[in-house]
Image: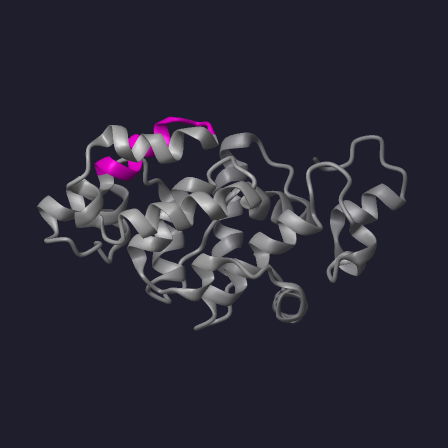
Amino acid sequence: MIAPGKRRSFQRRVLAWYAAHGRDLPWRKTRDPYAILVSEILSHQTQISRVIPVYETVLARYPTAEAMAAAPIEAVKAITDPLGYKIRGRWLHGAALQVADRFGGVMPQTLPELQRLPGIGRYTAGAVMSFAHQRDAPVLDTNVARLLRRYFGVVASPRARTRELWSLAAAVIPKGKGYLINQALMDLGAMLCRAKGPRCDACPLRRSCDFRRMARQGSRRPLP
């Protein structure tokens, strides 16, 4: 799918950029799968600056899945609901209940088991596997999808595009570096390859990006 030379260049440039510009986020200082699950559910469709204080409050009050499972759902939602997207508090509490009841308080360690928890889809399960368990599992949030779609010029139909983007997200992972490349792609998509006003001039991938090439050629239908 990707020429080996282009893949190596992509990996090298993304990782070098991340080493210099990656965000300092509290959940990047832990490998606790429960804490990472909390961060991912809270970050859903929400600005990171708003997530951080809520994340810290949730973990201070409920440091384990069992602690959250023992709490009333209304108490959990009282913390998470101000972020909006109010289903997330129910997802967190429901997942904690299942972890406590079915897994003895220990977060499951396989993608299928994680995806059976409330509110946990392919992306969130992959994030837990990658960021907590150091597995080379792909992640495809909105920012990563946009970056890959633009850089590789993915123009397939929506259903085929989703399959292709997941394949690309897996293909660009250097062996043993899933954690680093996934965090790097998330940051690069959020900070530079933005939906509106992308900062192409600062992007380490600008020289070989299909989106930038089409824009510079004056295409009337640039990639979204």
Viewer-closest of 9 and 123? 123
What residue is drawn where x is 78% and y is 36%?
222
Whether residue 5 is visible to the viewer of this picture, yes or no, is: yes
Q: Quadrant of residue 130?
A: bottom left
Whether residue 39 is visible to the viewer of this picture, yes or no, is: no
Q: Residue 63: x and y, percent?
A: 27, 53
Q: Residue 135: x and y, percent?
A: 36, 65
Viewer-closest of 78 and 90? 78
Is 17 contained in the magenta span? no
Q: Quadrant of the C terminus?
A: top right
Q: Which residues are magenta?
A: 84-94
Q: Quadrant of residue 155?
A: top right
Report the predominant secondary structure element of the magenta stretch: helix
What residue is drawn where x is 59% and y is 45%?
143
Q: Residue 56: x and y, percent?
A: 41, 50
The answer to whether 108 is drawn above or below residue 20 in the figure is above
The answer to whether 212 is drawn above or below residue 176 in the figure is above
The answer to whether 96 is drawn above or below residue 19 in the figure is above
